[in-house]
Image: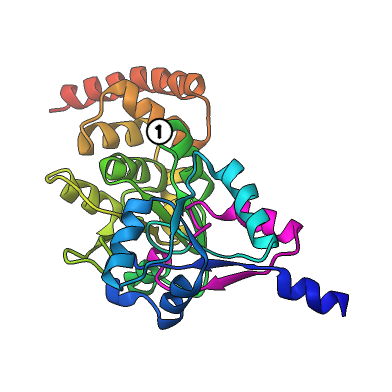
């Protein structure tokens, strides 16, 4: 009898997926939960209010974002423990997936409060399904690091990947990221840019890393981006790593990407997993050979 009373007095935490663009993508179940909840915890109350107004939902809202998540998670979990029903939403997509939500799940589970997911729109799955890249095996990483060095280390880890790799990326960094992909993973690596999914200007750009890099250099990139990278081509990887000398790779980068010697050297070092000093040593050793070869060619002209 005590167990039944305890269960009745315990509330629930709902993780409610919201549209990533098109408001028609919200589910009937999500609308019902948002209407019936005692409180809606929002990543941005102003953004969520637009959704609620559209569907005539008057449930009270409260902020729950990355800057107050630690304290607010305890507060909301405690309220749910006392019997309140609380819906957690992010600005778009599924809470806790590259958005706030993970901490409140932990707090709720510690208090034995039920946590129920309400599935729905996801940029990750929408982009993957329509990418044209293999979907039988994939890995989601969230957002790539803003710092180039950290970003290149992540890319280095997937150089020999045998599955589709999925990231989120900021529009103002996507060109730099494509440049890093070309340098670390090679110019022919398959890449898909899924931009503004489900929105008016939805766009898929599919092709080789080098081609997309050249294409996006010519225009300003806007909107939410899901970046998908195809699996490695073992033959291409073998060619880059074993048959192409450091001097050849440096010349290729300096010509095709218009990099100076310092920038090209940095890329090659990351690409081959050696220190910058070791790459510089090899580059200096190659210079006399290159000069000698040029003189020999000139002599026989």
Q: Residue at x 65, y 68 (%)?
A: 11
Label 1 neighbourhood size at 10 Å, few (<14), some (14-19), many (20+)?
Answer: some
227 falls in the magenta region: no
In the figure, is residue 250 to the left or right of 64? left
* Mark 1, residue position: 148
Q: Is 137 located above or below residue 45 in the figure?
A: below
Q: Is residue 165 or residue 35 the one in the foreground?
A: 35
Percent position of residue 3, x then y: 84, 75
Q: Secondary structure at mark 1?
A: helix
Colour treatment of the image = rainbow
The answer to whether residue 118 is magenta is yes
- Asked if residue 190 shows in the view, the reply is no
Q: Is residue 89 above or below residue 151?
A: below
Q: Is residue 24 visible from the viewing direction of this image?
A: yes
172 relative to 114 in the view: left or right = left
Residue stretch in magenta? 95-124
The residue at 30%/20% (across/down) is 292
Answer with the quarter of the image where residue 125 lies: bottom left
Between residue 283 and residue 63, name the one nearer to us: 63
Where is residue 52? Give x, y as percent: 33, 66
Drawn side of residue 16 relative to residue 53, left or right: right
Give the residue displayed 66% in from the left and 66% down from the top: 83
Camera-nearest residue between 151 and 185: 151
Tell me where residue 132 appears, x and y as whole percent: 33, 72
């Amino acid at each position: 009898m005590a167990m039944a009373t305890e269960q009745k007095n315990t509330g629930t935490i709902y993780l409610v997926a919201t549209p990533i663009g098109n408001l028609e993508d919200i589910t009937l179940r999500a609308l019902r939960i948002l209407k019936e909840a005692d409180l809606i915890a929002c990543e941005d109350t102003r953004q969520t209010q637009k959704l609620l107004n559209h569907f005539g939902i008057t449930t009270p809202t409260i902020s729950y974002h990355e800057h107050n998540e630690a304290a607010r998670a305890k507060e909301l979990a405690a309220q749910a423990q006392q019997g309140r029903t609380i819906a957690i939403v992010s600005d778009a997509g599924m809470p806790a997936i590259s958005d706030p939500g993970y901490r409140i799940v932990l707090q709720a589970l510690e208090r034995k409060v039920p946590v129920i997911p309400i599935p729905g729109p996801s940029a990750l799955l929408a982009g993957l399904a329509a990418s044209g890249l293999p979907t039988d095996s994939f890995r989601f990483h969230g957002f790539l690091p803003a710092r180039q060095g950290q970003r290149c280390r992540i890319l280095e880890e997937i150089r020999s990947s045998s599955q589709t790799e999925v990231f989120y990326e900021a529009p103002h960094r996507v060109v730099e990221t494509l440049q890093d992909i070309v340098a670390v993973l090679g110019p022919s690596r398959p890449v898909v840019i899924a931009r503004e999914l489900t929105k008016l200007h939805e766009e898929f750009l599919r092709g080789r890393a080098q081609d997309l890099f050249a294409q996006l250099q010519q225009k300003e990139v806007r909107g939410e981006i899901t970046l998908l990278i195809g699996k490695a081509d073992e033959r291409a990887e073998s060619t880059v790593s074993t048959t192409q000398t450091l001097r050849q790779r440096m010349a290729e980068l300096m010509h095709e990407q218009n990099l100076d010697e310092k920038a090209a050297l940095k890329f090659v070092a990351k690409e081959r997993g050696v220190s910058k000093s070791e790459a510089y040593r090899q580059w200096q050793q190659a210079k006399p050979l290159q000069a000698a070869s040029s003189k020999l060619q000139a002599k026989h002209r």
